[in-house]
Image: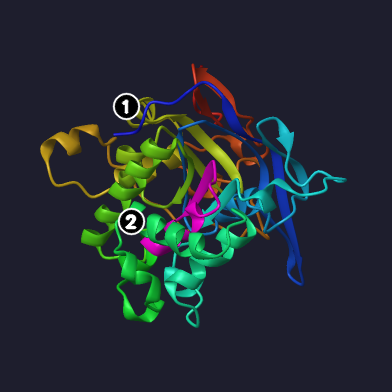
Amino acid sequence: MPNSVGNSEILAIRGLKKYFHTRHGVVRAVDGVDLSLHEGETLGLVGESGSGKSTVAYNVIGMYRPTEGKLLYRGEELGAKGRARPLHQKGEIQIVFQDPGSSLNPRRTIGQSLELPLRLHARLSGPRIGERAAELLDMVGLPAEYRFKYPRSIGGGERQLAAVARALACNPRIVVLDEPTSALDVSIQAKVIRRLMELQERLRLSYLFITHDLSLMRNVATKVAIMYLGKVCESAPIAEFFRHPLHPYTRMLLSSIPVISEAEKALKPQKVETRGEIPSPVNVPPGCSFNPRCQECMDICLVDDPAMREITEGHWVRCHAVKA
């Protein structure tokens, strides 16, 4: 189950927009996102491919610069002009990518991949680097001798744990997890998730967890936000979210989750027919972007894009059909 969290906001995303100009038009990958992450919390950011969730993550870690909006770490703006050393370079925000096979350098041993951030961020040198690398491997449940192995010589789950160790080498406060288990077998997924939860409790980490798997969020997230075509359409604490899903898109996603017991079936909303595919972010429908797929679409939905509204404490939704 999710860990208890403190009250201090460690990351604030305010009005985030990220547009890409292509020969086909402007891609509104992220189009006005507001999110908050508190210390020790896991925020699950969920959506179909093309929803913009990974683009949010890449803005947070500094791979992209926002087109508009602000990213605040402990109240201080990330990427602010005039900063001598950006917060991203201090290692306080790190990322674990989806595929460790491509995120780990195949020409470097696991130890060499760990040593680079230890030199740059932890300022270690000499024998202490090897000692700390062994400590990090032990922390994620890998033997110290894995320092001498190449990524190709170990399994996918072990590679991902090595990638987690590399992220921890910088002593981060926030770890962005970009679909960290989707490339792994189911049995290995459970091992990696269990280790991530143990590390969060031990090190008081805050996670921004990017995924398309809502059933996974039930067990690991503190709160969840659903993205659709670059915008958040619903966000809520995890228990409230599964108990009272409000947005038609959210109910569509939840109703498609496979279940294996009557208890799980009772938690699912009534079956909602899945209609169509997510449109191209180059050609976003006018009004509510979900209206071509929505069974509850009204005339106003075709012309007016709804604003996010707080329906109950902490439960926000962007939909004309939901009444306060």
Q: Residue at x 56, y 59 (%)?
A: 118
| Labelled disc at residue 243 | 1
Asked whether the viewer can see residue 120, the reply is yes
Asked whether the viewer can see residue 180, the reply is no
Relative vertical location of residue 263 with respect to residue 190 in this rendering, above or below: above
Q: Residue furthest right?
A: 82
- Tell me the amino acid under the disc marked 1: Arg
Place of residue 223 in the rendered image (x, y in percent of width and height, measured from the top left): 43, 32
Name the colouring of the figure. rainbow
Can you say which quadrant of the picture contains the N terminus? top left
Q: Residue at x 61, y 49 (%)?
A: 230
Place of residue 42 in the rendered image (x, y in percent of width and height, measured from the top left): 44, 37
Q: Residue at x 48, y 74 (%)?
A: 102
Of tags 2 and 1, the one toward the viewer is 2
Place of residue 36 in the rendered image (x, y in percent of width and height, measured from the top left): 58, 32
Q: Residue furthest left?
A: 262
Is residue 116 or residue 296 the one in the foreground?
A: 116
**Local SS, label 1:** helix
Q: Earlier in the sequence, mark 2 or mark 1?
A: 2
| Labelled disc at residue 266 | none
**Local SS, label 2:** helix
Relative vertical location of residue 173 with respect to residue 238 in this rendering, above or below: below
Location of residue 280 (image quadrant):
bottom right
Magenta stretch? 161-178
| Labelled disc at residue 138 | 2
Q: Is residue 301 left or right of residue 271?
A: right
Residue 167 magenta-drawn? yes
Q: Is residue 226 left or right of residue 186?
A: right
Label 2 and label 1: CA atoms lie apart by 39 Å
Location of residue 269 (image quadrant):
top left
- Tell me the amino acid under the disc marked 2: Asp
